[in-house]
Image (tube, rainbow, N blue to C red):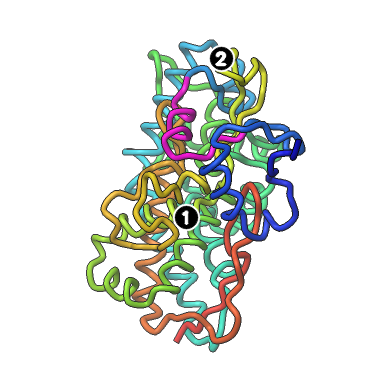
Amino acid sequence: MTAPPSLLDPGTERDPHPLYRTLRGNLPLVYDAPFGAWLISRYADVRAALADPRLAAPSPGPALARREDGTRGAYRTLVSSVLGERASAALAAGVERTAHVLARRLASRQEADLVAEFCQWLPTAAVVAALGLPYEDTARVHAWCRTGLDHLGGHRPALAAYLRPHIVRRRAHPGDDLLSALCAARPGGRPLPDEAVTDLAGTVLGAAGETTARALASFLANLLDHPRQLELVRARPELTGVAWAESLRHDPPLQIVPRRALEPIGPIPEGATVACLLGSAGRDPARFADPDRYDAFRADPGELAYGSGRHVCLGAPLARLTAEGGLRALLTVLPGLRRAPGPRPRAEGLISRSPRTLPVCPR
């Protein structure tokens, strides 16, 4: 009997879409023994799995994980509020300021790499500004975002030690930044302990980490690959959000989202890992017409890249603000921005996927 195809087969990391097509057509639910997970590949099935309470998301950060379920729900509500309404103005200002600084550094160049010189720096620097942390600490925080943080509040001890004196100062002298807002928050009538403030600040910073940088790189690459669509977005900035959502469908930064089965689900045993293939779901022809084509004006690009249902990623609003503000700054400061001549680097990666370089002519 022939073994089913695997995510670890040669060539899949270079281009997973042939495998995705095979899985969607013939093996929509299959156990991938080399990868160690059940694969779900169709849009409807992935969407259902992401919202299924029988499939658990990865554990939250250390402080939040120790709280009772009801309290954790209240904390999640708090985080959602901070990353949604309360973050918007501060983050938008941080993105605007930082994106223009980064873009102006490229203005006199004949050629530049947008990934290394713009996408990898903008998300972290914008959140550093929103939290009210010193600009000169951006490089240090950037390193933590890329290696030790995630959107669930995980953090390194070094981050806690770094934030401690800032938290002390904000409690004594609050400002209008996000760190002050966390210090002033009183869920259930009580102030948050320092450990929780650190975890929540780590959540905000984690949302500005590798995933957002990858999503931004793919977004800019898609628009630069379609100059006419880019010009229409330039002329009608209100379409930027739709173009961003379409990029997340076409090239999600996380191709695979893991879940753990809390009980048996059909052939899936309790405790098994389930791999929700976002990269496959976004190209499902049963859901999207001409799914392999990037169309910045697609009427309904779906919303899976940052989760679905109760597991929707709390950093999604931050990522969208970063993408919209970043593109606006680039189009303002670099009106002649275009792809550099020569071979175009392909996206890379199996679980996380995006262009590793994006050579452009800034002028």
Q: Which label belongs to residue 67?
A: 2
Label 2: which secondary element:
loop
* Quadrant showing the C terminus: bottom left
Label 1: which secondary element:
helix
Name the residue at 41% across, 55% down. 291
- Identify the amino acid type marked 1: Ala
Q: Position of residue 256 (x, y in %)?
A: 58, 42
The alpha-carbon separation of the residues under discs 2 and 1 comes to 30 Å
Q: Is residue 50 left or right of residue 20?
A: left
Q: Which label belongs to residue 126?
A: 1
Q: Position of residue 17 (x, y in %)?
A: 57, 54
- Position of 277 relative to 48 (above/below): below
Q: Position of residue 216 (x, y in %)?
A: 48, 59
Q: Is residue 14 left or right of residue 234?
A: right
Name the residue at 37% across, 45% down. 287
Stretch of the chain drawn in magenta: 39-52
